[in-house]
Image (cartoon, rainbow, N blue to C red):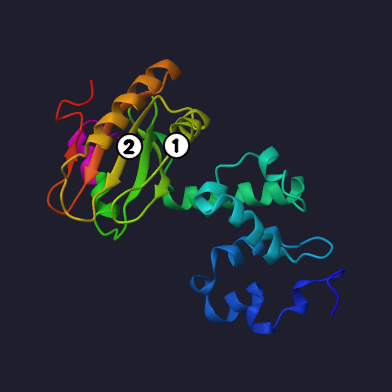
C-alpha cells in the first residue's frame, strides 16, 4: 500500500471512525476519531483521522482546539474554509446542547455562594485538578463555562493570556475562576492568592473584571473574594 493516495478505506474496518460509531456507539470513539468525522476527508497522503490526530497533538485537547478562529484552523495543512466551518459549527452545537435555553434565561450568578453551588455540581467529582472559568455578561448572567487547563493532583497551570482571550472573544464583562482541590482541603495556596491578584489587575486593564476565584473541595468550597483576597 502506498501513502500517496491513502484514504480511510485503507484502514482496518474496526478502526474506521464511521463504522466504529455505528457498531459501538459514539462514546467508544477517541477525540481524534470524533474530530475526523467532522473533518470528513483528509488530503493526499493523509487520512482525516491522521489529520485530526495532528491537530490535537498541537493543541492537546478538544477544549483548546474549540477556541481557535476560522483563520487559526485553516493554518493546518489540509483544513480549508469548509472544514474549519464544520468544526466551528460542531463546537457551537455542543455549546447549545449544554446550554439549550436562550441567553436571557441563563442563570444569574449573583453571589459567591451561587457560583459555588453551580460549580460544585460538576467539579466535586473530579479526580485531578482542573481550572475552569465562568464568563458573565454585564447583567451577571452566565454566558458559558469554559475549561481552561488540567494538571496532576497538585497543580493545574494556565496562562493569563488564555483566560482573557476567551473572555474577550465571548464579550464577557466579568469572569469567575474556579479550580478544585482533589485532596479535599479548600485552603488557598500562596500561588492561588498571588495569581488571583495579578489576574485581577490585568482584568481591570482589559475591561474584564475578575469577580471571584472559587476553590472547590469536598471539605467545603471557598471564595477568595469572601476571604478578602479580591476586591
- Tell me where residue 121 appears, x and y as whole percent: 26, 53
Picture quadrant of residue 49 = bottom right
Image quarter in which the N terminus is found? bottom right
Tag of residue 177: 2
Q: Earlier in the sequence, mark 2 or mark 1?
A: 1
Say above or below: 120 vs 188: below
The magenta region covers 108-117
Mark 2–mark 1 CB contact (< 8 Å): no
**How many numbered tags mark residues here?**
2
**Residue sitting at x 54%, y 51%:** 93
**Residue sitting at x 64%, y 78%:** 15
Say above or below: 181 vs 208: below
Say above or below: 104 vs 21: above
Say above or below: 117 vs 139: below
Left or right side of 137 for 180: left
- Tell me where residue 188 appears, x and y as whole percent: 19, 39
Amino acid at each position: 500500500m502506498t501513502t500517496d493516495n491513502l484514504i480511510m478505506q485503507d484502514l482496518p474496518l474496526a478502526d474506521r471512525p464511521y463504522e466504529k460509531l455505528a457498531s459501538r456507539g459514539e462514546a467508544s470513539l477517541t477525540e481524534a476519531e470524533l474530530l475526523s468525522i467532522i473533518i470528513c476527508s483528509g488530503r493526499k497522503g493523509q487520512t482525516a483521522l491522521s489529520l485530526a490526530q495532528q491537530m490535537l497533538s498541537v493543541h492537546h485537547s478538544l477544549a483548546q482546539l474549540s477556541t481557535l478562529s476560522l483563520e487559526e484552523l485553516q493554518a493546518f495543512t489540509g483544513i480549508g474554509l469548509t472544514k474549519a466551518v464544520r468544526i466551528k459549527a460542531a463546537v457551537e452545537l455542543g455549546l447549545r446542547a449544554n446550554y439549550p435555553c436562550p441567553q436571557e434565561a441563563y442563570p444569574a450568578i449573583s453571589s459567591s455562594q451561587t457560583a459555588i453551588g453551580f460549580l460544585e455540581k460538576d467539579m466535586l467529582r473530579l479526580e485531578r485538578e482542573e481550572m475552569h472559568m465562568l464568563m458573565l455578561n454585564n447583567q451577571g448572567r452566565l454566558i458559558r463555562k469554559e475549561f481552561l487547563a488540567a494538571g496532576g493532583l497538585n497543580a493545574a497551570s494556565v496562562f493569563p493570556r488564555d483566560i482573557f482571550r476567551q473572555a474577550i472573544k465571548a464579550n464577557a464583562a466579568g469572569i469567575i475562576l474556579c479550580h478544585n482541590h482533589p485532596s479535599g482541603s479548600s485552603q488557598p495556596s500562596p500561588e492561588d492568592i498571588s495569581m488571583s491578584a495579578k489576574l485581577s489587575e490585568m482584568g481591570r486593564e482589559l475591561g474584564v473584571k475578575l469577580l471571584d476565584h472559587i476553590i472547590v473541595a469536598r471539605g467545603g468550597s471557598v471564595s477568595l473574594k469572601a476571604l478578602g483576597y479580591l476586591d
